[in-house]
Image (cartoon, coloured by chain):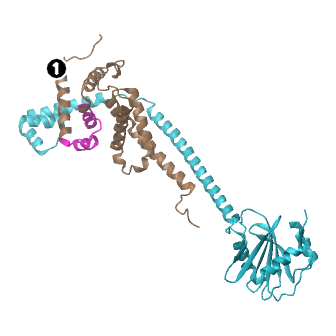
Chain colours: A cyan, B brown
Amino acid sequence: MDDLQYRRSIYADPTCQDEDVLAAQQADPAKKEFAQELIQLDEKLKQAMKIPVPDDLCDKLLLRQSFASHQQEKRKSKVHLALAASVAIIAGLAVNYLQFSSSYTNLGDYALAHVYHEQSYFSNEDNTRVSLVSLNRKMTAFKGSFNGSMGELISADYCRFDGMKSLHLVFQGLTDTVTVFIVPKKEHLSFTDKFSDDKLQGESLGFEHANILVVADKNESLEKWQKNINDNISWSI
Amino acid sequence: MKIFGNKKTTAQVSSNMATKQVRYEALVKALHGDLYRYAYWLTRDKQVSEDLVQETFLRAWRALDSLKDEKAAKSWLITILRRENARRFERKRFDMSEYEEASIMDTQSTTTEQEIENHWLREKIAQLEPEYSEPLVLQILGGYSGEDIAKMLNLNKNTVMTRLFRARNQLKEALDEAPVSRGQYNG
């Protein structure tokens, strides 16, 4: 290792422990002394570099951190609260929507579904009868009354017709029951004149205060029922 | 219903927070001095150094979980501090490489021979080009090897060794030129 190279390595790192540097120091005491000199210089530099650290710096750092993390916590809990609130609102809306929204868009579809749903409760052979008086008492809610009997009335009850209070009448028919709904006029179900599926048929009659729907099996003459209703019903103001 | 099964209990969270707090305090106590001194030699300004150290430790707190090896803590903090320092220049560019007499530590008030020499040396270190002084401070004050410094400064090792050589060479020359008795002796 030549002198220049040695000086370079010592200047770069006085404590250099490379083999050839150590060998050069062994061979030449002056080189060793030179290294010692620089180690001493380093020691001086180290002392000079150790500038005084402000006494309160440590406390300042801890204080600032405790403020910062406190702020962070507060922000976090606010975000959590906001999230929880949003979830709650959406859950509420969803429940509301599912419970109260109508899944049918027209009177006919709903009427058919309603009849199928309650098919098992009534049979054409039922012996119970409802008198005209009690039927008309129920009809007062719709500002209407029937002047005479339209047939053998098996059942007359208020029911929910897609969320609307309506009157559900079940008459004895030729082969199966005939269902008549008296439904208040509401806009969310569109009026359907005639409707049917493979078993049942139905027709709607629009009156001033209410729609009257007749649903029966295909053996029944809906025309006859409609005429019957038209002849018998009278509306109060 | 264990949808939130991985949620920690409040006790766990606060105990984690407590552990983090303990780690952080230990880190601050052990290393704030080294970091401040490093910042000082980087910026040569006491106030800026304090601000830098504060920013550095705040960032360190936020990222403390990413520090796995406590032995690496110092170089980790130095890396954060260098980044913060660079950011400072992005925000406001003013010439810091120029040597400012006023910003050099005044330690003359406690005048001892040692202090006078320190003061003189500080001026000389401050006069070094930053690219020379930075590795020198890391080597002498931080005790890092040439390889470590190369990694921290994103330089290759030979460049670092050359800069260290030049730094010491300049300081040695300055020392050799100076009169034997430096500073002012009053009485």
Magenta residues? B132-157
The answer to whether A98 appears left or right of A77 in the picture is: right
Q: At which x and y percent is residue A170?
A: 82, 80
Is there any visible trace of residue A54 in the rendered image? Answer: yes
Q: Nearer the viewer, residue B185 or B132?
A: B132
- Dot 1: element: helix
Q: What secondary structure is the stretch in magenta mostly built from?
A: helix
Q: Residue furthest right?
A: A133
Residue at 64% of width from left, 56% of height from top? A88
Residue density around tag 1, few if under 14, some if 14–19, many if 20 or more, within 10 Å: few
Q: Nearer the viewer, residue A83 or A200?
A: A200
The answer to whether B137 appears left or right of A12 in the picture is: right
Give the chain letter at badge 1.
B
Q: Nearer the viewer, residue B180 or A210?
A: A210
Question: Which part of the image, by quadrant, shows the C terminus of chain A?
Answer: bottom right
A191 up-or-down from A92: above or below:
below
Q: Nearer the viewer, residue B160 or A215?
A: A215
Is there any visible trace of residue B106 in the rendered image? Answer: no
Q: At which x and y percent is residue A134?
A: 92, 75
The three-letter amino acid code for the residue at tag 1 is Glu
A57 up-or-down from A186: above or below:
above
Residue at 30% of width from left, 11% of height from top? B186
Residue B151 counted in the magenta span: yes
Q: At which x and y percent is residue B141?
A: 29, 35
The quadrant holding residue B82 is top left
The answer to whether B119 appears left or right of A146 in the picture is: left
Residue at 24% of width from left, 34% of height from top? B136
Residue under label 1, please give it: B177
